[in-house]
Image: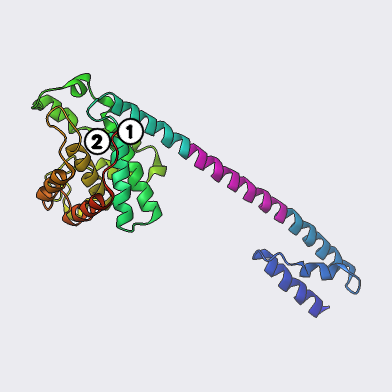
Amino acid sequence: MIDEVDKLIKILEDISLGDYSNDIMTFTTGGHSKRIQRIAEAVGMMMVKVETREFALKLMVEQLQKLNETIKENTLQTVGSIAKALGARDKYTEGHAERVAAYSKRLALRLNLSTKETHDIQVSGVLHDIGKIGFSDQVFENSDTKVSHEIFAEIRQHPIRTRQILQGLEFLGPAIDYAAAHHEKIDGTGYPDGLAGDQIPLGAKILAVADCFDAITTTRSYQAARSTEKALELLKEISGNHLDPFLVKTFSEEIRENGMETKT
């Protein structure tokens, strides 16, 4: 009787730890006392119910995860559409966000960054200027070669607005910080936070290189589009104080080997 009880207790202890083996069922057959059989049968039924509930919960979790991914995807598409529509307000920068995202992805891949990091950087490229959604029409309609103090002050606010717009979308993760810091400079003279050197996230540094290159190679109200080589020369000139020198070098190699993104 003592051995029988000890064995049963050991099986019950294993069950309590999540080991739902069928060993308990050996106590439901003849050769064991009625009390032991009743206990084993009751525990067996309890195991069935627990396993059924655990399986149901697992299915629910999987369904919720799929739903969560769908919500994330739909939200990102909506925000991306807003960013694209924003670009259409300015004839000089239409398609800019898509090209910056593409250049940023290419640089991230060339640096052998992880799939997750590369995705975050690409997403930040799509959304990096979404803070301009609050800009006045005079910013988009400005055609002067010189930007007024008032307009420039408004332009400098867009990384802050970008962070404010995106901060509730927690699933974007570091992409929010990359987008908010893409105007920071290596020497600390950038904006909005005056970050310098290693204080600037790598994703933001990558974004800055891509953003500058596309701006230089696109016709703007204040400048004509520069050639590929001239643009890469200008990037090199501002590396070290504005842009990360290693990233500029790596980006230049990528562009010379695989060319520019097509303007649409």
The residue segment tinted magenta is: 51-72
Place residue 163 in its image quadrant. top left
What is the crowding at mark 1: few (fewer than 14 residues within 10 Å), some, or many (at least 20)?
some
At label 1, the amino acid type is Ile
Image quarter where the N terminus lies is bottom right
Against 202, residue 99 (above or below) is above
Where is residue 91? Give x, y as percent.
24, 25
Place residue 39 in its image quadrant. bottom right
Place residue 47 in its image quadrant. bottom right
Main secondary structure found in the magenta portion: helix
At label 2, the amino acid type is Ile
The local secondary structure at tag 1 comes to: helix
Q: Is residue 236 left or right of residue 10?
A: left
Q: Which residue sits at x=24%, y=36%? A: 160
Q: Is residue 55 magenta?
A: yes
Question: Is the residue under label 2 in contact with that under label 1 (CB below 8 Å)?
Answer: no
Dot 1 corresponds to which residue? 165
Which label belongs to residue 160? 2
What is the crowding at mark 2: few (fewer than 14 residues within 10 Å), some, or many (at least 20)?
some
Q: Is residue 187 visible?
A: no
